Image (cartoon, rainbow, N blue to C red):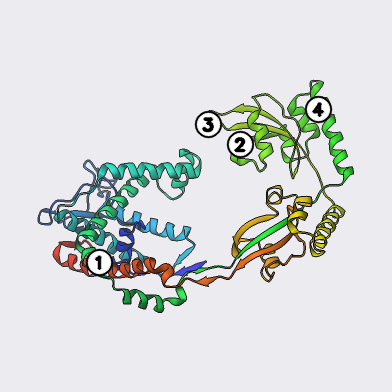
Amino acid sequence: MRRTRLRRLSASSVLFALALGAGPLVGPAAGAEPVPAPESVPAAEAVPAPEAKPAEGNTPLLVDRIVAIVDEESILQSDLERETELYRLERQYAGEEITASDATVRREVLDRLIESKLIIAAAKQADMSVDQEAIAGSVEEKIQQFVERFGSLGALEAELARSGMNLADYRARMASQLRDQQYLRLVVGKFIRPDIEVMENEVRDYYQAHLAEMPSEPDSVTIADILVAVQPSREARQLVQQKVSRIQAALSRGMSFPEAAKSFSEDAAAARGGVVGVVAKGDLYDDGLARAVFTLKVGQVSEPVVTTRGVHIVRVDAEQADGRRAISQVFLPISVTEQDVAAAKSAAEAARARVSGGEAFSLVAADVSADAASARNGGTLGTFRLEDLSESFQKALVDLPVDGVSEPVMTPAGWYVFKMVARKDGHTFTYDEIAEQLRQAVESQKIEAALATYVKDLRKRFFIEEKG
């Protein structure tokens, strides 16, 4: 687990991140009513509900209380507790460990909330306003994105419940964040950015000072391949074909599909009568299987579909309103033996020997490769970042020279033989390649520093009272 210390959540960090749209945990719950002006605030710190009744034993029931007042806006105990807990949850999901004490965390989260309120106060004093309708629209767009991510509204609500929230809480928090972001961008745009100037020598100095941190272009390779798939023996294929014939005959005689699945299928769904469940087009691992499933009508049974895993006979049980389909299947795996693997390796070695003997790689690929897409292109796969390839591919390619041909490499798809068509060594980006990004980084630093000074001045200009 990555360890991190809770740094000072000041204008130089959180507020500036907010201006850039990073969305830290700032702002009160949406809909909170503003507290009266400071001179009219009652001395009592508790804010009871309008009709709160004394608890048993005549002890007053504390519903919430004000922990701080900034200009005309309050920060409630519930705001502080919610933002503190959400901060912890977000660090937890990021795999970070908070080493600061509870008191330190709460202090710095409160500072964050105060600074956000100061920005809002400054914006309102300058007659700035935010587009509430646009904020509401953005909130609903984000909620819909989460619904799509989790699969349904119910799944999203269940996930929020595990974090101690409901959808209304999360919608309010999101609206509050977006409101604060808009106010901060307005303030930065009017009072900070116009005074920021970035000189070219400053950008070059930044590049040199951070050279070790500069992004780099990794090694890339352009490769061609010959794939020799591991095929089951002729005897194994004949055995599966005999089983398929018996299944089709049983179905023709009137055996129900669930009975056929229980009697013949060799997968976990057999005990359930072959029931697989509801699938969408993108859920199935094989294009041919997907075509069969989404071509059939409800109640129809497919012809045998051969995939890399075996033979599927599929029935569509129902069609959902969203186009997904409930399916059942009878599945027969096609097993390969060590002899099958060895035979495929021998074929791959023979293909490599043909290339080493002078035959064109492209012709051998067109002749024997099971990778039909690349075989049509002379075996060429394309250009890839070396670090993006699998470990076994990297090992075969890392020292392979241009025009070199690799030894066969075993994968779940079969044995690959690669040719190195071209390679490009990685390098750290030069100043000229990333000059604009560097300028933005320097500008961001200057804005961050200026914003820290600006917020420090706001603490003197506006009323702030903490309630202990």
Identify the residue position indicated by label 1 in the image: 451
The amino acid marked with disc number 1 is Leu
Which disc is residue 95 wearing?
Answer: none
Q: Nearer the viewer, residue 271 or 316?
A: 316
Which residue corresponds to the image point at 84% horizontal and 36% vertical from the top-left? 241
Disc 1 to disc 2, C-alpha distance = 52 Å
Residue farthest toward the left in the current orientation of the protein: 39
Q: Secondary structure at mark 1?
A: helix
**Residue 249, image x, y percentages:** 83, 25
Look at the image and tell me whether residue 229 can be seen. Answer: no
The type of residue carrying mark 2 is Val
Residue drawn at point x = 26 percent, y = 50 percent = 59
Callout 2: SS: strand
Q: CA distance from mark 3 to mark 2?
A: 11 Å
Q: CA distance from mark 1 to mark 3?
A: 50 Å
Which of the image's four quarters has the C terminus?
A: bottom left
Residue where numbered disc 2 is placed: 279
Question: In this image, 210 relative to 224: left or right?
Answer: left
* Residue carrying label 3: 322
Question: Mark 1 or mark 3, which has the lower sequence index?
Answer: 3
For label 3, count other residues whose C-alpha is less than 10 Å away and answer few (under 14), some (14-19) or many (20+): few
Res. 320 image quadrant: top right
Residue at 84 percent of width and 38 percent of height: 240
Looking at this view, is 422 or 130 the one in front? 422
Alpha carbon of mark 4 to alpha carbon of mark 2: how far? Answer: 24 Å
Q: Nearer the viewer, residue 449 or 167?
A: 449
* Place of residue 300 in the rendered image (x, y in percent of width and height, measured from the top left): 69, 25
Q: What kind of residue is marked 3?
A: Asp
